[in-house]
Image: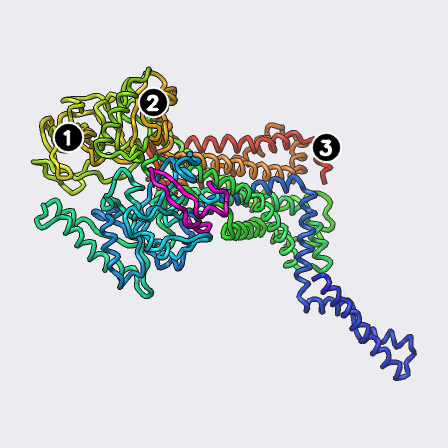
Amino acid sequence: MMFWRSKREKELEEELRSHLNMAEQDRAARGDNPADAADSARKEFGNVGLVKEVTRDMWGWASIERFAQDLRYGLRLMARSKGFTTVAVLSLALGIGANTAIFSVIDTLMLRKLPVRDPEQLVTFNRFFMGQSDSGLFDYRLYLKFRGLPQVFSGMSGTFTTDRSNVAIDGPGGSVDPSQVHVAVVPGNYFPTLGVSAITGRVFTPDDDRVPGGHPVAVISYAYWQHRFAFAPNAVGRTLTFNGTTYTILGVTPRGFTGEWIGRPADFWIPFAMVAEVMTELPRQPSRILVRILGRLKPGVSAQQALAAAKVVFDQDLRDRAGPNPSPQELQYIKDTSIGVQSAARGISPQRETFTQPLTMLMMMVALVLLIACANIANLLLARSTGRRREMAVRLAIGAGSGRIVRQLLTESVLLAMLGGALGVAFAQWGANVLASFASAGPLRNMNARVFLDLHPDSRILVFTFALCLITGILFGLAPAFRAARVSISPALVERGVDSRGSSGLFSFGKLLVVSQVALSLLLLIGAGLFVRTLRNLKSQNLGFDTDHVLLVWLAPGQTGRWGPATAALYQTMEERLSAIPGVRAASPSVYGLLQGNTLLGAFMNVPGYVPNSQSDLRAQWSIVGPRFLDAMGLHLLEGRNITDRDTTTTPQVAVINQSMARHFFPNQDPLGKHFESWGITKEIVGVVEDMRYESPRQEGQRMFYMPYRQQLGRLTQVICVAVRAVGNPAGLSNSVRQVLREIDPKLPVLRIETVDEQLDDLLVQERLVATLAGFFGGLAVLLACLGLYGVMSYTAARRTNEIGIRLALGATRAKVLGMVLGESLLLVAVGIAIGVPVTLAAARMISTRLFGVSATDPLTITGATLLMIAVAALAGYVPARRAAHVDPMVALRYE
């Protein structure tokens, strides 16, 4: 481009010279003196420099040149003001980086579409019970029935996912993956339905899913190829071995495709024909598998048309399962159960709803922090613009228009924002990883609380950051730019000292910015206080059992191939061996697990003589436990007996219920010896135990019953929790517990060993995330607001130096001057608080559902945050006030 421009400049010079020569020759031909002819020709032609400028404007380079000049000048100006530049860039980097980090999580989890063919055509189904979402999982046989709807679906797939351990590469004797892998079991038409092909090798076809147990093949993800095979080109054809079956790798999926479940990326896929080999705990029983149904609509078919067709099949399936003579409870269940359809263009994510509210709140917080940072920098620029009054007056005097001045200053502001954004991208990557680490925590059984996201920067994130930098630069640069463009030329050119006009009024623009900063900072500070107190209340909540001496051991016995009686025998062996460890009082398995945060609807109860007010009154939560469970948890048996080793499949089924269940179903009665029915099986109540918060510290009065595992062989699930009660510190038993489990079965996957406090931290991951970040952003907002107050008051005091000198010369005491300047600071803070408190009270209702043990309008939190704001602001205002009070009157009188 530079070569092209030089060529055009040369051509322009030659063309102008040619015109002048022709005009000169024309004058000479008319008889003019050669010297006069040249002068006359030039005068007739006009201003050569002006002609050049007009011509260059026609080329379209002038605006680019001026922009380049503005950039160079802005860079030189920032280099001369290193302190200002550093403060501004760091403030913007934090604000822009935080916004980018949270947006990257929101984009990945909520906005980005699946990298498949025509994702808008994909839909998934949900089950609803009594108007509430129950589950997105359905029986495999229902999926087969949905496949019989070719009039509305061009493709249909049912996927089942599970975690497996001890996956060996290149045969049973190969290297073993030390971590759990996420396996997706899919039909042969899964990849063709989604429109996904392999980047190397091939994906499944329907021919890879025809014979049960006859297709030991796998397709691995790009990330697993990178992680376990280091992009080896010979990965296709190598093998994966787990649960005694070896699978040959057929291909690798494209980068970015990790399945339809966003937040739970699949490591590899196995054909559904191999489900019995994958799920060895449920051998040859694929009908017991619950799948997530994914359909592709035919062109021209709407989601509502697909729902109408699927509803007919779904309702008929409910009636078929109830049989020809359904009970009243079954009829009511059919009436209360329905099916819904939703778009799957952005993938399926049970976590999406879980994280939507906290991420939205965090996005609002960081947006407010960025606004406060913008107000801070606007104040700094306003102060700096006073020192550039003469510069702007000179520019205006030599012909620069107001628009040119505004463009120059906005260019400087946007350049500042771009530098902050560039640094913010690095901060955003770190922040996004922090968010991902929080989100990937959570209870093992409750996957709705766990998210695994690939948050690498892409074009969407960079475009967002660029747009945010542009908007931010214009936002904080507009007011200083317009003020500089309206400078009076004559006064500015003759000005020698500091102009004090229009600076000290209560409602000056800079002071209004400080008031807004204080109001927004108080809003963030109160919100942070409420979230921190919520987290503290939840962690200190009495759970109803001995939390200080319990160790939780998470295992996956289903992956060892045991099921039914063999699993029960393993449970008994673990009870006996773990209880024999020195320092252990008792140990017991809990099939349901503790502190999972699940929001399950529970089991339907049929209690003779009980009249419910609604269907929800007939539900209660349940768990399957061992005989020593109450001892392991430190629970007290209130009446009756405990579960014992004699409660087996050959004896009548029994249950121990908690106090809440006894009060609900048997008010003013002795529940011992009473019976209730669940899943069509009658159980006798043999004991009543005190309540405990089994699922979450937020729950209270939860109805609960416990069943012996020896009587529930068909419900012994793949992941369990063994509670080990210690005499002293339970964490010290971890190595001994792990060693005993290894002796029992070296292949038994030990998923995690943790104390109750650690499990509680996992359960409260969202509360910890919000409280931690809210506290950080609240503190950052207060710091920025106080820096803004300090800057404005320092600038105001400096401009009033002459006035302060006169006051001191006339007899004013330094204490009075100190009080005058400090009082002005506190007045700004008071106005900000007066605005901020009502705004906070109005906004607090938005977060009331996420609070626990504290109201959204808690006076203690509001008062504490307000006092903290006043104290920090008073400190920020004291420094310039003290400096003003110690001004030498003689120096001040000569200030101008």
Q: Which residues are magenta?
A: 228-257
- Give the label on residue 890, or none: 3
Q: Give the crowd class for mark 3: few <14, some 14-19, many >=20 residues within 10 Å.
A: few
Q: Position of residue 254 (x, y in %)?
A: 45, 51
Camera-side residue: 471 or 860?
A: 471
Q: Nearer the viewer, mark 1 or mark 3?
A: 1
Q: Is residue 768 above or below residue 107?
A: above
Q: Are marks 2 and 3 in contact (CB under 8 Å)?
A: no
Q: Residue at x 35, y 39 (%)?
A: 163
Q: Is residue 700 above or below residue 225?
A: above
Residue 143 % position (x, y): 25, 52
Pointer 2 residue: 740
Kind of residue at badge 1 = Thr
| Numbered tag placed on residue 852 in the rendering | none
Location of the C terminus by quadrant is top right
Q: Residue 728's quadrant in the figure?
A: top left
Determine if the magenta segment contains residue 672. no
N-terminal-most mark, 2 or 3: 2
User: Marks 2/3: CA distance?
Assistant: 86 Å
Q: Residue at x 66, y 31 (%)?
A: 808
Dot 1 lies on which element?
loop
For residue 649, the mark is 1
